[in-house]
Image (cartoon, rainbow, N blue to C red):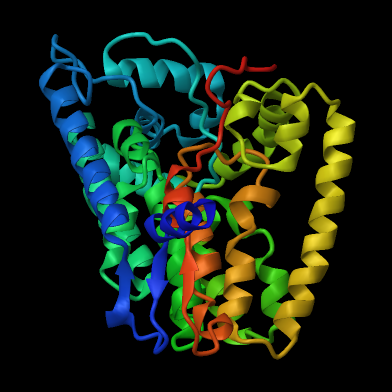
Amino acid sequence: MWSTVGRHTRDIMAIDLLPSGRPDQFQLARPVELTCFALCVAQAIFLAAGFVQGLWLVNPAGQPITADFVNVWAAGRTALDGDPAAVYDAVLHNSAEEAALGHAFDGKLPWNYPPIFLLAAALLALLPYVAAHAIWMSVTFPAYLWAVRAIIGHRVGILLACAYPAVLCNLIMGQNGFLSAALLGGCLGTMQRRPLLAGCFLGLLTFKPHLGILFPLVLVAGSRWLVIVAAAATVAVLGALSVLAFGWSPWEAFFHALPVISQATLTEGRGDFAKMQSMFAFIRWLGGSEGLAWAVQGSLIAVLAVSLCVSWWSRISFEMKAAALAAIPSTEFGTSPLVEEMPALLNRITSRVAARPSITSGSQWSIVPVKCMLKTSGTPPGLPKRR
């Protein structure tokens, strides 16, 4: 009996890749397909109901709802007003955020991004706040869908991507996780055929440097010189554009603010360790010292860096190399990626699906997408948050 139950459970939780491995034969089990569809509908209804009831975008009084996007819009508005360096002053930036919303709010949303991201923030700030939020999601969400669809190689990827619960969080909060997922997936997905384009994607990803911290090492190990050149050129162009647009002052303020950001996030835990996806945060959440957390994190980084460099130097398939690299950035190397980070989903799917030509060997292979979709970071229900 138990073997029968186990077999049916595997069938329900699996995506089956038929022996030929052709994308048009990549199918979801019917119960999984219905579950994903139900999740999509539920999230759409939640957003619609939230908007009608004044819980999303604008409140019943017509004022914007507090969301993470105000961090981006307020930074762009400050830059347009001629004081881009002020975005790295927590007090001034908080005042700008409250001015954007028209009311005060609990908590802090500091600007921790490098000045190159001010270019996008300034463009968004040319629009009214609510319109900018909507357009930001309208542009980055399809890019995220494209990345997941391209990696899986079948339109079922769109369904899985839409069903992922963190999609709702990103849409509500106006997070940039869709963008980072699209850039990471775009880089890995185009590296074989269009290395220059892949390098451009990687260069754009530097608005969140922790997500690509290992790319330089593995690209050198894999002799991906065109990707390196294109990425370096993209970063140089972005840096030059930011200087032309805003001057040197935001760069000076950024490097001056880095120790303050580190102290607040990693030492004092103001970002909430329960929401972070790294060994460092896990040890700190358990009450471990900062020194112990860094020692464990550093050891893990060293081991993974060596392993990845060896794999990229070897002759294993590119799909396996990409899967190994994509599975790491948001979970082991970033000390502060929050639960809203969509690469967490993208990496898990990539690490299982992108490598399928190398591990199927003509036989049937299954993965567990529901586990990927429902696995989220943060404090498990019922457990207290640790500081």
Which corner quadrant of the image does residue 384 belong to? top right
Relative image position of residue 369 (x, y in whole percent): 43, 56
Q: Residue 298, relative to residue 365: is it above or below? A: above
Q: Is residue 56 left or right of residue 176?
A: left
Which corner quadrant of the image does residue 101 belong to? top left
Q: Residue 337, relative to residue 387: is it above or below? A: below
Q: Residue drawn at (51%, 46%), measured in percent from left and top?
A: 115
Out of 147 and 59, give the one closest to the viewer: 147
Q: Residue drawn at (65%, 32%), measured in percent from left and top?
A: 257
Q: Is residue 356 left or right of residue 41?
A: right
Out of 349 and 250, give the one closest to the viewer: 349
Which corner quadrant of the image does residue 189 belong to? bottom left
Relative image position of residue 249 (x, y in whole percent): 56, 40
Relative image position of residue 155 (x, y in whole percent): 25, 69
Q: Residue drawn at (50%, 18%), measured in percent from left and top?
A: 108
Q: Residue 219, relative to residue 101: is it above or below? A: below
Q: Is residue 312 left or right of residue 180?
A: right
Viewport quadrant of the C terminus: top right
Question: Visible in this render: residue 343?
Answer: yes
